[in-house]
Image (spheres, grey):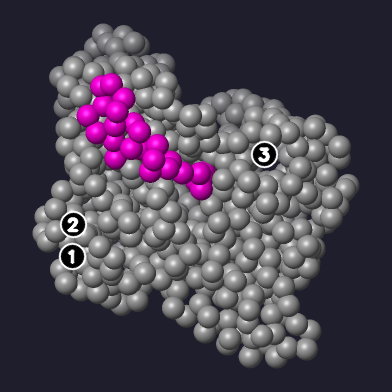
């Protein structure tokens, strides 16, 4: 049996490779995802571990990764006093700022949109490993005002060489900094897309702390024989209240926790699409082995007649599946490296540059890749293998090998149950106030998709019948044969179409949801946006308050309302807040309140969104414990508002509250209101002139602001479409595979048709029409399900601001047309192969 299985396998290399190709794509996505995130994690480990033995910092910065930056500092006098603590070899103050960006020779900002732009003071303090965090590759370190050192990657991207004069943008009191490049540095841990600009200590203090002799933190280096833990305890005993000493290892672990959360999200996001690809690929595998079992019916019957048992036949088919899965998993694992490089390149476009980091391949990646690939293949092949073993020898020798209709009846009944369950779950998520409504919708849509898969041999008949009516009138007998071929084996046709249906369901759902989200943004801005302009940073980072003051001084400007975004915790529940001036904000963005008012916002109160109030059971007058920039205090809820695209934050506090807690004085966005009698063109030109020297800051009117809010939605949709394209490619291969195997299965029939006068062109047309029928069946079912899913998802998130249903009719129609075009392409190779069959040999084929 083993020799027979090998012979069968090697005799059908091409068709089995088609099945393996689905596994290759799915496994490559799984392994590529893990390789990329492991590489990313290794790169970040190098960064977070580049820290001193002990770090001294303000106590409010202890959760700095979550609480956001703080303006609280470490005085130079405190740093000097640490040098006398027993066990201390040296103590060095550091100045750092994450919002300093280099402007290239072409006037473009380098970095941003993700990794920070770091402005740093230079000193030669060693890390816990005993090495300096950065070394020079050319030039020298900065020694005074007007000098800067860049990391090599930033210098290269910006187009600067030693001796050039360059510009930097900061969020400090001096928005534009001009300096001479005196050195090129290499950062020990790698930069992962961040930009590094080193200044001497006095210059850095002047830029970020107004010239005060203060530091962001201090590194304390231990003498030989002193452990970091002992040193931290000794230093802590000498620190005044409000400061803490933490080992470098603890700081690295603290930073790594937040980074790992982000990496886990990326990994899960990528693996979801890998799972979809593998699920779609399973249809291709099931179809392939089902057809192969049918084609080998005589061979299997002969084996049974010669004494092979049912289980031996089943194991024979499963052995072939095992080899296919092993081959596909191995090749997929290798392709995972190529995919990881592709993902690296994609993320580099968003600023996350890993070009200097070698790919990391962990043994667990190989285990997961083989486990997933083998499991999917064996499960998908089990039913065809079991069916092969269950065939009695006499029945298997018959020409008619169609499955009994009772199997379809069972599928329809199970599908009907899943349909009802999916319908109920979708309705509960979309039209009731049930918790986690989006999950209910997701579960319901999954039930509907599974129901469609099971019942598609029945519900697809009207679609095929309609196409058959068109085919018969346009192509005559050829169209009739194409219709009959598509309906000859409804399970096979439905399984092939289902693979495409799944991909198009998800694409159509995201299209409806994306269109609804953008329509909701437009509605929200039109109804809640009273400001005439928005001043913001092009890379999503805060900008200098000096820019806001200059804009406020422009003739014709009535009001400027700055916002500062920051993470805030209320009773331990974290969320993003906006710090505002209530008076100016009320003129620029009139909020809708369900209770309370904007006027009630003070330094001792907070405003919360309707959703947050519902989740935390808050009402006006509720007392909450707030954590702002690491500083905890008691606040009272003074109002509950409805979020909008202008202010999507769930918490509002005053600028005074943020400043008292140590939030740095830098604005995230500023809303500008014109004087009623001012000339719009004049005011706009004057503001543009004010910000002309700060290339990171942009001015937008209402339409441009709405376009900016829609841009991330489009960007996310493009990424999702690209990833879903993997599943669609596998579905297309499924159509090609089904047609190719069908041609082999119908070799004698095709020979007879050719013998009685069917031309090669007519044969190719017949197969093309059959392929189009399968593709359009999948497209129609997918678009209908996608419409339902997108509508339900929009309704479930109506309370979260997605309150407008928009159906992109033209886009959905294009999907259907493209599906038909895909059907034409999928039939090219099978049609060509069928047309080249020798007529006499085909007629004599058994």
The mark lying in front, picked from 2 and 3, is 2
Q: Is residue 100 visible?
A: yes
4 or 818, which is in the foreground? 818
Mark 3 or mark 1: whose residue is earlier in sequence: 1
Image quadrant occupied by the C terminus: top left
Region rendered in magenta: 68-92
Whether residue 681 is situated above or below residue 671 in the rendered picture: below
Mark 2 or mark 1: whose residue is earlier in sequence: 2
**Disc 1: which residue:** 182
- Residue 655 lies, in percent from the top left, at 67, 54
18 or 647, which is in the foreground? 647
- Between the residue at mark 2 and the residue at mark 3, the CA separation in whole angstroms equals 54 Å
User: Dots 2 and 3: beta carbons under 8 Å?
Assistant: no
- Between the residue at mark 3 and the residue at mark 1, the CA separation in whole angstroms equals 55 Å
User: Dots 2 and 1: beta carbons under 8 Å?
Assistant: yes
**Disc 2: which residue:** 141
Q: Residue furthest right?
A: 595
Whether residue 274 is situated above or below residue 353 in the rendered picture: above
Give the SS element for disc 3. helix
> Quick check: 650 left or right of 309?
right
Q: Is residue 700 visible?
A: no
Label ID, residue 832: none
703 or 828, which is in the foreground? 703
Q: How many marks?
A: 3
758 or 802, which is in the foreground? 802
- Residue 633 lies, in percent from the top left, at 69, 34
> Quick check: 750 left or right of 509?
left
């Amino acid at each position: 049996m083993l020799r027979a299985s090998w012979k069968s396998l090697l005799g059908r290399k091409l068709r089995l490779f088609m099945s393996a190709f689905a596994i290759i794509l799915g496994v490559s996505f799984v392994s590529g995802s893990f390789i990329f995130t492991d590489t990313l994690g290794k790169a970040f480990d190098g960064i977070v571990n580049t820290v001193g033995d002990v770090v001294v910092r303000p106590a409010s910065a202890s959760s700095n990764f979550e609480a956001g930056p703080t303006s609280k500092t470490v005085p130079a006098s405190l740093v000097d006093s640490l040098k006398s603590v027993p066990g201390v070899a040296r103590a060095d103050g550091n100045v750092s700022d994450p919002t300093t960006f280099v402007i290239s020779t072409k006037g473009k900002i380098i970095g941003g949109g993700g990794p920070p732009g770091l402005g740093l003071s230079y000193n030669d303090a060693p890390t816990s490993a005993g090495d300096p965090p950065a070394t020079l590759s050319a030039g020298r370190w900065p020694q005074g005002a007007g000098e800067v050192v860049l990391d090599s990657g930033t210098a290269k991207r910006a187009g600067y060489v030693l001796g050039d004069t360059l510009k930097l943008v900061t969020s400090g009191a001096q928005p534009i900094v001009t300096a001479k490049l005196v050195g090129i540095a290499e950062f020990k841990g790698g930069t992962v897309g961040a930009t590094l600009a080193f200044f001497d200590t006095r210059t850095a203090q002047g830029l970020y702390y107004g010239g005060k002799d203060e530091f962001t933190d201090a590194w304390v280096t231990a003498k030989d024989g002193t452990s970091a833990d002992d040193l931290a305890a000794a230093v802590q005993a000498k620190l005044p209240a409000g400061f803490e000493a933490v080992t470098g290892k603890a700081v690295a672990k603290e930073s790594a926790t937040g980074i790992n959360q982000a990496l886990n999200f990326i990994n899960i996001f990528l693996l979801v699409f890998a799972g979809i690809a593998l699920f779609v690929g399973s249809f291709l595998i099931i179809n392939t082995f089902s057809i192969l079992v049918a084609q080998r019916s005589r061979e299997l019957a002969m084996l049974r007649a010669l004494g092979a048992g049912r289980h031996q036949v089943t194991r024979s088919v499963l052995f072939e599946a095992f080899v296919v899965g092993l081959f596909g998993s191995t090749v997929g694992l290798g392709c995972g490296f190529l995919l990881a490089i592709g993902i690296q390149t994609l993320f580099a476009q968003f600023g996350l540059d890993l070009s200097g980091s070698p790919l990391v391949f962990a043994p667990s990646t190989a285990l997961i890749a083989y486990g997933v690939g083998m499991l999917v293949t064996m499960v998908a092949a089990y039913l065809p293998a079991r069916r092969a073993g269950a065939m009695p020898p006499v029945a298997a020798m018959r020409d008619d090998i169609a499955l009994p209709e009772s199997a379809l009846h069972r599928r329809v009944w199970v599908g009907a149950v899943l349909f009802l369950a999916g319908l109920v779950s979708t309705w509960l998520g979309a039209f009731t106030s049930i918790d986690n409504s989006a999950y209910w919708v997701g579960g319901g849509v999954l039930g509907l998709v599974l129901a469609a898969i099971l019942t598609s041999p029945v519900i697809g008949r009207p679609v095929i019948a309609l196409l058959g009516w068109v085919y018969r009138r346009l192509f005559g007998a050829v169209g009739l044969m194409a219709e009959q071929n598509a309906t000859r084996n409804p399970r096979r046709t439905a399984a092939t179409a289902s693979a495409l249906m799944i991909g198009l369901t998800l694409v159509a759902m995201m299209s409806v949801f994306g269109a609804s989200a953008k329509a909701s943004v437009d509605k929200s801005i039109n109804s809640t946006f009273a400001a005439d302009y928005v001043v913001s940073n092009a890379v999503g980072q805060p900008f200098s308050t000096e820019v806001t003051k200059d804009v406020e001084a422009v003739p014709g400007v009535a009001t400027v309302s700055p916002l500062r975004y920051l993470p805030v915790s209320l009773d331990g529940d974290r969320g993003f807040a906006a710090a505002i001036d209530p008076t100016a904000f009320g003129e620029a963005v009139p909020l809708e309140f369900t209770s309370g008012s904007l006027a009630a916002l003070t330094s001792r109160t907070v405003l919360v969104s309707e959703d947050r109030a519902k989740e935390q059971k808050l009402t006006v007058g509720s007392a909450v414990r707030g954590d702002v920039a690491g500083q905890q205090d008691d606040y009272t809820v003074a109002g509950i508002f409805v979020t909008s695209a202008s202010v999507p934050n769930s918490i509002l506090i005053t600028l005074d509250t943020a400043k008292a807690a140590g939030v740095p004085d830098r604005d995230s966005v500023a809303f500008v209101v014109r004087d009623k009698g001012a000339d719009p063109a004049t005011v706009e030109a004057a503001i543009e002139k004010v910000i002309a020297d700060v290339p990171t800051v942009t001015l937008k009117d209402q339409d441009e602001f709405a376009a900016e809010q829609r841009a991330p939605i489009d960007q996310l949709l493009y990424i999702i479409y690209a990833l879903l394209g993997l599943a669609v490619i596998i579905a297309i291969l499924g159509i090609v595979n089904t047609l190719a195997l069908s041609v082999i299965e119908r070799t004698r029939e095709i020979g007879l048709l050719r013998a009685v006068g069917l031309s090669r062109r007519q044969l190719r047309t017949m197969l093309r029409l059959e392929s189009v029928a399968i593709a359009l069946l999948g497209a129609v079912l997918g678009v209908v399900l996608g419409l339902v899913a997108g509508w339900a998802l929009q309704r479930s998130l109506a309370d979260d601001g997605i309150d407008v249903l928009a159906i992109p009719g033209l886009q959905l129609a294009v999907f259907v047309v493209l599906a038909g075009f895909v059907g034409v392409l999928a039939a090219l190779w099978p049609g060509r192969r069928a047309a080249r069959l020798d007529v006499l040999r085909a007629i004599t084929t058994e």
